[in-house]
Every structure is written in C-alpha cells, then in structure tokens.
Amino acid sequence: GSENSGHEFATPGDGLRAYRAAFRHGCRGAAEALCLLPAGRMVQLLACEARAARGGVRGDPLQNRRFLATALDHQRSAAALAAEPGAGALIPVRRLAVVAPHFDDDAIQAGGAILAARAAGAEVRVIWMTDGARGVPGVPPEESTRIRKAEARAAMAVLGVNDYHFLDAPEEHVRARGPWTPRLRRLLEEFAPERTHVVWWADNHVDHYETARALAAAWPKSLADSRIASAGTWAPIPLGAPLVLSPELRRRKDEAVQAYRSQVAVVDYLRAERGLTRWQAAGIPGATHAERYWEVPAWAWFAAFRRSG
C-alpha cells in the first residue's frame, strides 16, 4: 500500500543497500555486512586480528577485537552451514513451530512461512523465549513486557496463530539451561512439529545465540526425524531454500511486522526486512520478495552448530 511506498526497490541490489542502511542509520553497527564479506576482506580481517593481538593499532573499528572475533565466528559458522547444503525448497508440513528469541523475530524472520503454513491448513505454534523487559526505551521493565506482549498478540492475530506461549526468560540473559528449558522441551514434545523455525546462532545477538543453545538442550529425542529451518536478520544466512512472498503474503507480513510498533520505532525493521527479502528474491523468475531458510534435519542442524565452535 501507499504506506510502504518508501519500501519498494527496483532491483535486488537496491533492496540490499536499503537493508544495510536501515541498521546503519539506526546506529546499530556493521553487523549487517558480515554475511557478504569477500575473501579479500577476510584476509584483511585476519591480518588486523593479528595486529590487535600484538597490541598494535587502536581506534579503527576494524582493529576492534570484538568485532573481528564476531566477523571470523560468522565466517566459521557459514562454513559449517555450507557443509550441509540444505533443502532445495521448503516442503509443506502439517505442524510448524517457531521458537523466537524476542517479540518481533517471529514476524520478521518467519512471517511468510507462518502465513503460508496457515493458508495450507497447517497447525502453527509460536514460542517466545524472552520476557521483553529491556526492549522499550524509557519505560520500567514490567511496562516494557506488557507492551511487547500486547504487540505479540496483535501480530499473531494478523498471522492467524492462536497457539502461542511465553517462556519469560530474562531478555539479554537467556541461558541454555534454566526453568524455560524443560518448558520448551514439553511444548515441542507435545506439539511434535515436523519443522521448527529458529533464528540461526550467528545472528549477532546474545539472545539469538543462547536460544540456539537452549534449543539444543531442550530438543526431544522423539523429534529425531523433524527438521529445523533457520534465517537471520542481523547477519542473514547467504544461502537457503526460498519461500516466495506473493503480494498478499507480503502485505500481511508487513502488517505483522508493523504490529511491533515499539521496535519499529527504534529501528526501521520494515524497510530492512523488505530490502532483505527483495535481495533474496534475486534469480527467482517473477518473484520480487522471498524469505530464505537453511533447512535441514535436526541432527544436521545441531551437528553444524557444534562444528561452528
């Protein structure tokens, strides 16, 4: 619609530039570039890391050891993913689960997959790991939690999901083993999803990483034949099975993302997400937007997680 007129992109390259700019202008750093580092830049980063380890140059962000470690960790994780190429396309399922670290990861990272599953008659269960207590600037933690849960319920109404659960792990302090871990195991075991969507571990947020660890700790043995699909927002996975977003899916996903008003007010997630899906549609005939997922059997997902270090 006209409200999104500033979020239309003529080419995949335009979408990619808009995606990067949305985070950069939000003063969130350079994490969004990590998925696209060419080999030459990786050589430079390795050289910079060696200089930083010797106590050399200071001040330049490329000399910052934390950024360098993040970039190199991402590269190692991407290599682990490449060893398991994943499926060529998402196979329709009867039961789909989404394990979201935060209120908004559900819509931003898997909104199209949720909508497509519901349109096909599948059952969908959404599980949020964190309590949202740190997500709304300038309000007490309890009020932040209230606001973000209300936004989550509004997003679920748009996505057509009425089976959702709050695990209330402390935001930015998720751990692999806490009271939320056995609850996560029970929710997965009783629902028995054929596919579970989760943010991949290298998406450059501590809660995204710890959610992957919690999923590994909670994963029921009964789901040995299930599959896991991952995507990323801060550091997208540069490969994966496409899910083309029709104009109607695109419109409803926009509405779901915009339901998270408190988050879109801080970072223009709608522009970033639309730019990313425009880029991910490159090479798909007739498509202008697509989600992409690294989707593999659960055992292969956990094996790659271990290999990533």
Image (cartoon, rainbow, N blue to C red):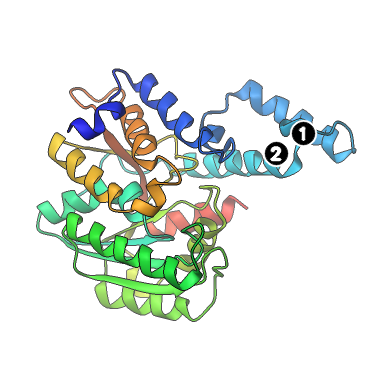
Name the residue tied to disc 1.
63
Q: Could you tell whether 93 is left or right of 257 in the image?
A: left
Mark 2 — residue?
68
Q: From the viewer's perspective, tell me whether residue 227 is left or right of residue 43.
A: left
- Asked whether the beta carbons under mark 1 and mark 2 sit within 8 Å of each other, the answer is yes
Distance from label 1 to label 2 (Cα)?
7 Å
- Type of residue at label 2? Leu
Say which amino acid is labelled 1.
Gln
What residue occupies the far front of the structure in this picture?
A: 138
- Residue shown at 18%/55% (left/top)? 158
Mark 2 surroundings: few (<14), some (14-19) or many (≥20) residues within 10 A? some
Secondary structure under the numbered disc 2 in the rendered image: helix
Q: Quadrant of residue 70?
A: top right
Q: Residue at x 32, y 18 (%)?
A: 11
Which badge, 1 or 2, comes first in the chain's sequence?
1
At which x and y percent is residue 7? 30, 29
The residue that appears at 51% across and 51% down in the rendered structure is 304
Res. 287 image quadrant: top left
